[in-house]
Amino acid sequence: MAKKLISFVIPCYRSENTLEAVVDEIGQVMMGLPAYDHEIILVNDGSPDDTWGTIKAVVAKNSDTVTGINLAKNFGQHAALMAGLGASKGDIVICLDDDGQTPADEADKLIKALDDGADVAYARYSHKQHNIFRNFGTAMNEWMASAMIGKPKELYVSSYFAAKRFVVDEMIKYEGSYPYVIGLVLRTTKNIVNVDVTHRKREVGESGYTLSKLFGLWINGFTAFSIKPLRIATLSGFVFAFVGFLYGIYTVIKKFVYPVAPMGFAALMSAIMFIGGMIMLMLGMIGEYLGRMYISQNKNPQYVIRETTRDEKE
């Protein structure tokens, strides 16, 4: 009976000092799973350090199992994941981080969940070892995914997950300029489970996610896979219009009852500023949608591959 192939996809950014240990750990794990073969795909996402040099060194030592992909610039984690998913060949694909915080030695738990019938298995951490800022960003991302794109509230999503081949094949059909991995997973299947694993403390370097990157991720999530913000804007407009209409009636009645009563310049200006701000916010949101549609229509690529180590082998 032919062995199943497991593909490990790892987006890499500033990981020249951690990547080799992650690859070695995957190799050790797979030695304990003789029923599976494996491949590892390392995607250098325009890292400013020598991550690509490290990837080439790792490939030289593990040429049968490891492939390196070098993107032309920094496209972001989700675009790098899409590049890796597109290059993967496995019956099961496991995505994890390059910093060693996602425990590769517990990949067997994710594989078992898929063998037991799940289509996708996400790692769930009882205690995350990120800093307060990163944990806040994760919490906001969880809320956004639940409120905007229909993620079940009880489902915890993370960067460490495993998916069956048919799910990956459906995900990589997406050609939009702004991929959002959990959105692609949720529109493909609802048969998703959580698996409890240990989250490790970062030993080297800092997280590559800044506040601007996290904000961009939230915006990307709901503008690429949800129209709820537009519906909220419509509902808000209706509510404000209705309140304004009632207030107008109140003002007319008040004028007849108390002819000498002041009209309330300060209150009027506050209302104008508030409503004007809401209008600008809604227009900006509509502009965000239109801008993304325009960029996608112009075929802005998700990612551009400069070179791969497979090219050198061929």
Image: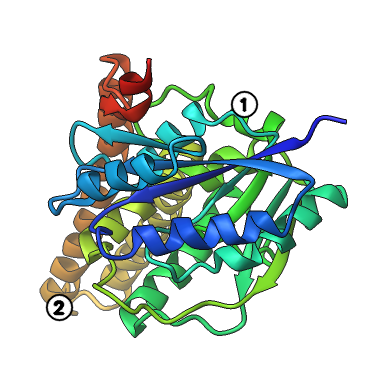
**295 relative to 96 in the view: left or right:** left
Q: Residues within 10 Å of mark 2 (few under 14, many from 20)?
A: few
Q: Earlier in the sequence, mark 2 or mark 1?
A: 1
The numbered dot on residue 169 is 1
From the top left corner, tell me how far across and down residue 224 is, in percent: 43, 37
From the top left corner, tell me how far across and down residue 76 is, in percent: 30, 45
Q: Residue 272 or 192: which is nearer the viewer?
A: 192
Residue 76, can we see it? Answer: no
Residue 46 against residue 258 in the figure, above or below: above
Question: Circle 2 sits in a helix, a strand or a loop, which is it?
Answer: loop
Residue 264 against residue 112 in the figure, above or below: below
Residue 240 against residue 267 in the figure, above or below: above
Q: Quadrant of the C terminus?
A: top left
Q: Residue type at mark 2?
A: Pro
**146 relative to 265 in the view: left or right:** right
**15 relative to 85 in the view: left or right:** left
Q: Residue 236 or 222: which is nearer the viewer?
A: 222
Q: Residue furthest front?
A: 61
From the top left corner, tell me how far across and down residue 218 is, in percent: 38, 54
Determine the residue positioned at 28% across, 41% down: 56
Q: Residue type at mark 1?
A: Asp
Determine the residue positioned at 26% across, 69% down: 255
From the top left corner, tell me how far across and down residue 100 is, in percent: 43, 68
Q: Residue 273 or 299: which is nearer the viewer?
A: 299
Q: Residue 73 or 52: which is nearer the viewer?
A: 52
Question: Circle 1 sits in a helix, a strand or a loop, which is it?
Answer: helix
Q: Quadrant of the N terminus?
A: top right
Toward which corner of the image does residue 163 lie, by quadrant? top right
Q: How many marks?
A: 2
Determine the residue positioned at 73% across, 44% down: 36
Q: Which residue is mark 2?
A: 262
